[in-house]
Image: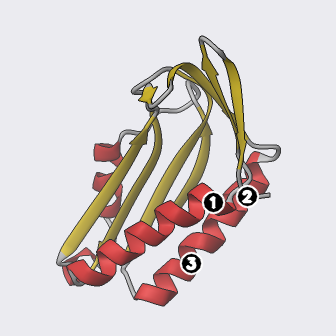
């Protein structure tokens, strides 16, 4: 299991590197499915264009601990072999990678379901503050907490 909250610029992990790490699992031979997700900063939405975004969390270690709990619960629920998540905090531009998830499992159904659940739980349950800066001002979005 990999559960990391990283400050952008301090350490850089790509989705391909995360997939390679998951493939090093001693149980990879049991896997028939490997799904990945890379969330990037969206520039264009109806009615607004994001010029930049700041993403913060009050306590990186606490947020990482909560991420570990999410991963453990999802692994137990779906019986997948490996889950790896990297979420960045800091200052971002449109198209910058923000959130990486890789799930390895025996079959595609439970592996895809596990991936979807990790993505949704991280988005809504972890304590992040997102500030989207547009030409019209700043939009603040709170999650988790």
Query: Picture coordinates of residue 114 (x, y %)?
Result: 40, 75
Q: Is residue 11 left or right of residue 79?
A: right
**Residue at the extreme front:** 47
Residue 79: percent from left, percent from top: 40, 88
Quick check: 124 above or below 107? above
Quadrant (top left/top right/bottom left/bottom right) for the C terminus: bottom right
The answer to which of marks 1 and 3 sits earlier in the sequence is 3
Q: Distance between the residues labelled 1 and 3?
A: 17 Å
7 w.r.t. 80: above or below: above
Q: Which residue is drawn at 49% across and 67% down?
A: 118
Name the residue carrying label 2: 144
Residue 21 pos. (x, y %): 35, 56
Q: In this view, does 67 lie to the left or right of 56?
A: left
User: Closer to the camera, 77 or 51?
Assistant: 51
Q: Do the residues labelled 1 and 3 touch (CB within 8 Å)?
A: no
**Residue reaching furthest to the top:** 135
Residue 135 visible in the picture: yes
Q: Which-is-in-front pick, marks 1 and 3?
A: 1
Q: Disc 3 marks which residue?
A: 72
Categorize mark 1 by other alpha carbons within 10 Å: few (<14), some (14-19), many (20+): few
Check disc 1 and report its element: helix, strand or loop.
helix
Callout 3 crowding tier (Cα within 10 Å): few <14, some 14–19, many ≥20: some
Q: Nearer the viewer, residue 61 or 45?
A: 45
| First-in-chain label (2 vs 1) | 1
Residues marked 2 and 1 touching at CB (< 8 Å): yes
**Residue 109 x/y as whole percent:** 26, 82
Residue underneath mark 1: 124
């Amino acid at each position: 299991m990999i559960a990391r909250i990283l400050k952008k610029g301090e350490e850089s992990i790509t989705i391909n590197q995360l997939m390679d790490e998951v493939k090093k699992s001693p149980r990879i031979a049991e896997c028939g499915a490997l799904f990945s997700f890379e969330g990037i900063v969206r520039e264009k939405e109806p009615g607004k264009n994001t010029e930049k975004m700041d993403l913060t969390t009050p306590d990186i270690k606490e947020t990482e601990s909560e991420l570990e709990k999410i991963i453990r619960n999802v692994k137990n629920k779906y019986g997948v072999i490996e889950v790896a998540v990297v979420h960045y905090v800091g200052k971002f531009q449109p198209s910058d990678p923000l959130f990486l998830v890789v799930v390895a499992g025996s079959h595609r159904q439970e592996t895809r379901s596990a991936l979807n659940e990790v993505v949704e739980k991280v988005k809504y349950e972890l304590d992040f503050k997102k500030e989207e800066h547009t030409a019209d001002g700043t939009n603040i979005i709170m999650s988790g907490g």
